[in-house]
Image: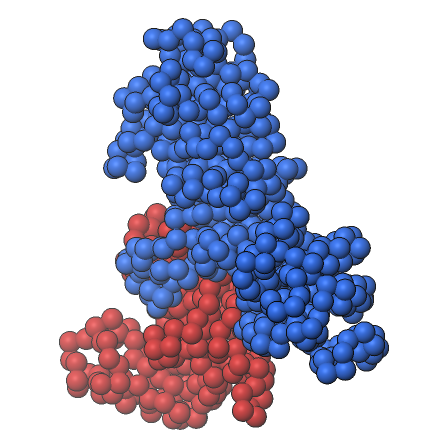
Amino acid sequence: MSKKSDVDCFFSPKGVAIVGASQTPGKIGHEIVRNIKLSGFTGGVFPVNPNAETVLDLKCYRNISDVQAEVDLAVIAVPAGLVEGAVRDCVKKGVKGAIIITSGFSEVGDKGLEEKVVSLARPGLRIIGPNTFGVFYAGSRLNATFGPGKVLRGKTAFITQSGALGLALMDWTTEEKYGVSAIVSIGNKADVDDADLVEFFSRDPSTSSILIYMEGLRDGRKFFEASRRAVRKKPIVVIKAGRSARGAQAASSHTGSIAGQDAIFTAAFEQAGIMRAEGMTQAFDWIQALNENPAPKGENIVIVTNGGGLGVLATDRCELLGLKPAELSNDLKQEIQAITPSFGSVKNPVDLTANADDALYGKVLDLVLRRSDIDGVIALFCQTANIDPTLVAQAMLDARTRDALEKPIVAAFVGGHLSQVAYSRMLEKKFAVYPTAERAVDAMYALMARHRQLEHFKAGGGAA
Amino acid sequence: MTSWDPHTKASKAIASATRIGGRALLGLEADKVARAYGIRVVKSALARSEKEAAFVAKDLGFPLALKVVSSDILHKSDVGGVKQGVDSVKGVKAAYAEILSNVRRARPNATVEGVLVQRMAPEGHEFVVGATRDQQFGPAVMFGLGGVYVELFRDVSFRLAPLTKKEALDMIDETRASRLLAGFRGSPPLDAGEVAETLVAVGKLITDLPEIDSVDVNPLFVYPKGVLAVDVRMILKKAVPS
C-alpha cells in the first residue's frame, strides 16, 4: 500500500532534474527542458548531461548528484540502456519521483528490464512510466512533457494509457477552448498506476473531475477500491478500450465461462460508480456537463425548444436513457402560456415555436429555472430565418447568470455558421453546449447519473 | 472461533472433500458449505441401508427423490438409479431396494457408497446464482435466468464480492429476468429479497474461502415466498494447501 502523499512529488516538486537534457532543438531531452522553463514553473530546474555546459541558458550538471539543491522529481530521457544507472543515481540523490520517458521496456516485450528498474527504485522512489510523454499539472504550472508548450488550464485531470491520444488532446484543449487541470501519460504503469492517480486527484483542489483512457489494468481490485472512494468526492469518467477474453479460457464452470470478456469490467465500474463512456465524444460531453453544472437535486427535467422536431428527438433520447421529462404543474403551464404565442404547446417539451426570439427564451428560462419543481433544463435552438442565434446564446448565458448556477442547464445549437458562432461563444463562457439535441440529452444524463450517485451516498450506500 | 462460524464449518467440509482428492465439491459436501453461509439448500441425507433411508426420510418429510451415489456411475437414471415422488416410509424402503438391485444388475462392478435421499422441491421459477474469481478483479458474483437458459440467453449480471443487499438488488434489476421476479403476466411477484440474500451469501462464501474457485447454484428455485437451491456445485482451486 503506497503512502498517502508519495505521488505528490510528480505534481508539485520543489526541484526538477531532466536527466538526458539536450542542447538540440527537436530532441525529447530538449523539448522537456523548454516546456518546463516556459510553463512558468517556479521550482528549481536542473538539466543533467555530462557533455553540456548549459541547456537553454540553464546550468547543466554532469550528474544528478552534482546538484546541490533539493531535487524531488527527475524526468529521465536517456536511451534504454542508461535508464538503470539513472535510476540508481536518483535513489542516491534521494529523489522521490521519476518520470521515465524512455521506451523499449515491457511494451516491446522486455519485462525483465522494467521489473529490475522498479525494484532498484523501491521503496523510496516512485516511477511513472516507462514509455510516457510526461506529466502536465496546471496547479504548479509544470509542463514536464515533450508535447505542446501551451495547454489550456481547466478542471479535469486526464490520465491516459495512450501517449498519442494524450498528445493530441493537449493540442485539442487549446483548439476547443476546453482545458485540463492535469495530463498524466501513464505509460507502462510499471509502478504508479491508475489507482494511485485517482487517489491523488480526488483530493487535488484544482481538479473537479477525472477522465481516464484505459486499455488494461494490472490490479483491477486496487483500482476498484480507489475509485469507489474517489467518486464520493468527484465524478470519474472512463473510456475503456477492448478487453481480451483471456480470463474466460481457464474457466470450468458456468459462471466462469460467462464472466469472460467485458462483463466483470462493466460490473466493477458500475459498482464503483465510475461512468463508462463509449468513446471520446461522449466522454468529453459528459465531462463538460459535469464540470460546468451542479448535479440536479431531483429527477424533473424540462426541455425548452423552438422546433417540434428537436423536442421529439430529445424526448426519444430521454426515454432511451431513463430520463423523465417532468409533468408540468398547472400554475407553471399558466405562467408560460401568459408569455408564449397561443399556438405554442405548453407541455414538456415546451415548444416556443420558430418565432421565439432571445427575449422569449430569456423569460421562459427564468420561469423554469426559478421553479422548485424543476431540477434541470435542456435548452434547444434550431436556426431559423429571422432569429439571430448569438442573441439567443446570450439570453441563455444571462439566464444562467441570474440563476447563479443553482440548477444544471445544458444547450444545443443546431444550424449553420451563426449557430456555430453562438456555440463557440457559449463554450468560451463555460456553458455545456452541444451541436445536436441528442448530445445535450446525453450531457443531462451524465448529470442525472451523478445526482443518483450522490443520493445513494447520502442514503448511506457505497463504500465507507 | 466457535462451530457456529460459517468459515470453520465450511472449511471442515472442504477439507474432507480434498482428502479424497476431489477437484469439485458435489452433492452433500457442497450443500454443507452452502448451508454454513445461510444459503437455503434443498434438504437431503445419505443413507447406507434401507433402515437408514427410512430413518432419514421421517426427518426430511415427503415427497422425496432417491438417487444412487457412486463415483463409477455418471448417468444415474440410465441404470435405474433414480426414483422420484416417493411419498411414504414404506415407499422409501422399496425404492432403496429397487435402486440397489437395478444398479447391481446394470453395473455389477460399481462401488456404491449409498443412496442420496432428497426432499423434492416444489416447482419454482428457475434462476442461477454463481461466483467466480476474475484474474484482475478477484471474487465476483453472478445472477441470471437459470436452468438450461443460462447458456442460451446469457441474461446475467455481475458484481464484485463481497456485496451489499442493495448492490444485489441492483444487479437483479439489470437483468431482463427481473421482470419475472416482479410478477410477469399476472403471476404473483417472487421473493427478490431472498434472491438478494442468496447473492450476498454466495459473495461472502467466495470471499471467505480461497480454496473455492467457483460456485454454481443452478437452479435456484424462487417462490413468492422464499428460495431453494436445488443443485449446488463448487470447483476447488487446483493447488489446495493441505
Residue drawn at x 40%, y 64% as measured from the top left: B215
Q: Colour of chain A?
A: blue
Count the marks: how many? 0
Q: Nearest the camera: A370 or A420?
A: A420
Q: Colour of chain B?
A: red
- Residue A438 is left or right of residue B30, and the answer is right
Is residue B239 visible in the rendered image? The answer is yes
- Residue A50's place in the image compared with A332, above or below, is above
Q: Quadrant of residue A435?
A: bottom right
Q: Position of residue A111 (x, y in %)?
A: 29, 34
Is residue A93 visible in the rendered image? The answer is no
Q: Nearest the camera: B202 or A2?
A: A2
Q: Nearest the camera: A42 or B151?
A: A42
- Residue B125's place in the image compared with B156, above or below, is below
- Residue A168's place in the image compared with A18, above or below, is below
- Residue B79 is left or right of residue A371, and the answer is left
- Residue A337's place in the image compared with B214, above or below, is below
- Residue A387 is left or right of residue A2, and the answer is right
Q: Nearest the camera: A96 or A29?
A: A29
Q: Position of residue B32 (x, y in %)?
A: 44, 66
Residue drawn at x 49%, y 51% as measured from the top left: A238
Residue drawn at x 48%, y 39% as measured from the top left: A170
Task: Give the image's coloring scheme.
Answer: by chain
Q: Quadrant of residue A139?
A: top right
Residue drawn at x 42%, y 29% as measured from the top left: A146
Q: Position of residue A85 (x, y in %)?
A: 34, 17
